[in-house]
Image (cartoon, rainbow, N blue to C red):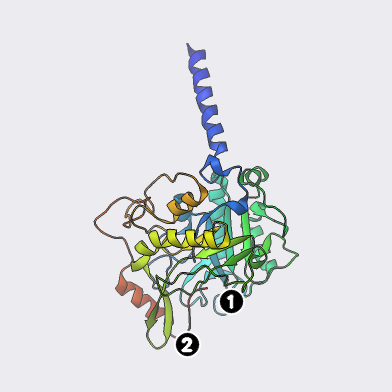
Amino acid sequence: MKLIIITIFSITLLSSIVSSQKACNGYPELCGKLYSGIAYPTTHNAYAYGKSVAANQNYDIPTQLKDGIRGFMLDANFPANNTNEVHLCHSSCDLLDQGPAATTLKQIGTWLDDNPNEVITILWENAGKVPAAMFNSIYTQSGFVKYAHFQEVGKDWPTLSDMIGSGKRVVNFVDTGADPSVQWLMPEYSYVFETPFENENANAFTCTVDRPKNQERPMYVLNHFLYGTLAISTSIDVPQPDKANTTNSASLADHAKKCQQTFDKIPNFIAVDFYDQGSDNQNVLSIAADLNGVQYVPKQLGDGKSVPKGGKGTSTVTSVAKPNSDLRNANILTGLAGVGTIAMFVL
């Protein structure tokens, strides 16, 4: 009897392991697909979360990973009077400084250690003109460089299964400052183009090649987020959390489908603000799954304590968890003190 029980237990355990190994980024159907043929839910200014008018997300990167985000737009910059440590900041670290980049990379690395069947992408905006060698140092010190994948321009990308098997499960792009001496930090616009990012009108999202100008690439970023204008002593572009429910649902699905028709391929990096928001059973996660031809399984998003309304992956609630507007305005006024004239926070 003991032998039978042990055998049954062993078979069950083996079956569980095999099933887990067959899922790539959560779906068995994605294992055999090329990296370049998949849509990845992506967070714009992924690190910028919290109760600040400059925040683009409601939750931190570990929570985003848990929820299914697989593309992360990060900004590398230097704090004032310190060029020895790279921080995650918008165009000025006086406005929003999420701390050392190495800290966030360690968090992502820990998650990758615990989730061996996942492939992610980091798209760096090099606002501080950080040298490639310094990126390499940060990645090495944080133990993150072991995951970095290098892809030769013009060559077919591997499948997710191949990348998982090789252990090279993080693709790293940088908009400026790439250097052949750090091969894995790849020049974004040699591989990827982007649709316009300066969007203020919810009815004016377009499917044109914005960066690099009029030059298509094998993959592309679908920028789908809105800015508003905050007028204090100067005009400042700020995210629009109160519009995220509509921006991240039917509007996003329509934009993605139009660009798929325009470019004859699905968008690869679907970049949004406030990824946890949506409505009418749609959000960036469900829309990406639809583009990938897989079935999204709804789940609660966020920290499990407060669930923002809307989105196929969220529960129905009567109140909305969002930053207090008074706190947000206070933070921006504090952040602007002594900064001078500022045109934009983002991108």
- In screen coordinates, is 8 left or right of 244? right
Give the side of residue 278 with respect to residue 38, left or right. left
State the CA–CA distance, disc 1 to disc 2. Answer: 21 Å
Mark 2 = which residue?
Answer: 341
* Residue 342 location (% of width, % of height): 48, 84
The residue at the far top in this view is 1
Expressed as whole percent of the image width and height from the top left, the position of residue 272 reads 46, 63
Q: Position of residue 7 (x, y in %)?
A: 53, 18
Q: Relative to the observer, which residue lies in front, 100 or 158?
A: 158
Residue furthest out toward the left: 318
Q: Amino acid at mark 2?
A: Thr
Which residue: 53% across, 59% down? 261
Label 2 crowding class (10 Å Cα cut-off): few <14, some 14-19, many 20+? few
Residue 161 vs 100, above or below: the answer is above
Of callouts 1 and 2, the N-terminal one: 1
Residue 276, relative to residue 296: is it above or below? below
Name the foreground residue: 206 vs 14: 206
